[in-house]
Amino acid sequence: MDAMFIIALIFTLLILALIIKGLMIVQQSEAVVIERLGSYQKTLSPGINWIIPFVDKPRSIKVRRYQAIGGENIPVVQEETRIDRRETVLDFPGQSVITADNVSVTVNGALYFQVIDPERAVYQTENLIQAIEILAKTSLRSEVGKMELDKLFESRQEINDKLQIVMDEAGNKWGVKVTRVEIQDINIPAEVEDAMRKQMAAERERRALVLRASGEREAAIAKAEGEKRSNILVAEGEKEAAILMAEGQRQAIDKVLAAGGDRLDPQLVVGYLLGLEYLKTLPDIGKEGDRIFLPYEASSVLGAVGSLEALLKGNGKG
């Protein structure tokens, strides 16, 4: 009786040990690939799962990560049985890339990916992280090598989009979804940076000169336009004044002729009026003390003024 009890107890403990050994708890956002006798059996989902001890075994996956050792990022390869299905960032170190215009630059990028199919991630590639990193680097070299340095800085988003397309094509085979690819830094040699700085300063100076010349040209045009309008207004004023003066002289001639009747010669009347104009200007002719020479015709005109004036007075008496 005691022997049977001991055997039953041992059997019960063995069964409990097998049950405990076969229990596997998978955390949320994790997955475990199970192999049975060396072949794929199933993928454990989050929660409590049970496997056959010593027959079912988790298949490990190689993960390559970088650790800061002595100020440098050193790649470290680890084997893990639990596959993290959360979005993961792969910040691979900067690498030297040659642009289309033969400038060597150092590009540092980051890649965001998520394991969608754990089975493919385990069986389709020997080292998932390393495969993703190498593909990202080679694709980055290919895309950057097609661009010149000046275009590289303004085409980051274009490069990111093209890299994501390439990574998606390969990721589908590996059970991985690449969500984002970002170029973090682009480092250029010091001499190239100095040349670009000088080029930028020269370009800004050129733009300033162009703007200054354009402003001066517009100012000159505006000034010329103003002078043109001013001259036009002066000319129109002189024209109107001349017309009014001529109209006044005509009316004066008509009045003189009307006062003299038929005895007055029209030429004599015109000479009379001219003589009056001479008389009006005489007070202003020597103001500065300069010597003034009057033309010979002036004396004749002044004589005609006296004659016509006497004639008009005599006519008035008669």
Image (cartoon, rainbow, N blue to C red):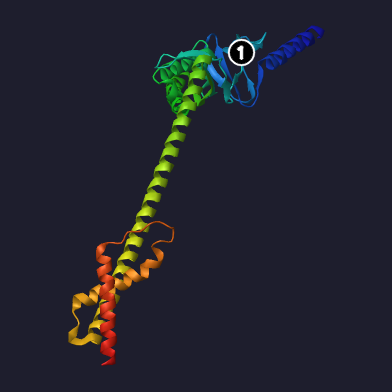
Closer to the camera in the image, 127 or 136: 136
Residue 66 locus on image (x, y percent):
61, 13
Residue 249 locus on image (x, y percent):
28, 75
Query: What SS does tag 1 mark?
Result: strand
Closer to the camera in the image, 121 or 71: 71
Q: In the figure, is residue 74 to the left or right of 253?
A: right
Query: From this viewpoint, which residue is outermost toward the right?
Result: 2
Quarter of the image for residue 16 reads top right
Q: Quadrant of the N terminus?
A: top right
Residue 206 locus on image (x, y percent):
44, 31
Count of numbered tags: 1
Q: In the figure, is residue 308 to the left or right of 103?
A: left
Quarter of the image for residue 212 reads top left
Residue 76 locus on image (x, y percent):
61, 9
Q: Is residue 102 above or below residue 207?
A: above
Quarter of the image for residue 284 reads bottom left
Closer to the camera in the image, 31 or 40: 31
Q: Quadrant of the C terminus?
A: bottom left
Query: From this viewpoint, which residue is outermost toward the bottom?
Result: 318
Residue density around tag 1, few if under 14, some if 14–19, many if 20 or more, within 10 Å = some
Whether residue 239 is visible: yes
Closer to the camera in the image, 282 or 258: 282
Type of residue at label 1? Tyr
Query: From this viewpoint, which residue is outermost toward the top?
Result: 3
Q: Which residue is mark 1?
A: 66
The residue under the point 41% across, 13% down is 102
The residue under the point 58% across, 22% down is 89
The residue under the point 53% across, 8% down is 38
Q: In the figure, is residue 95 to the left or right of 317?
A: right
Whether residue 189 is visible: no
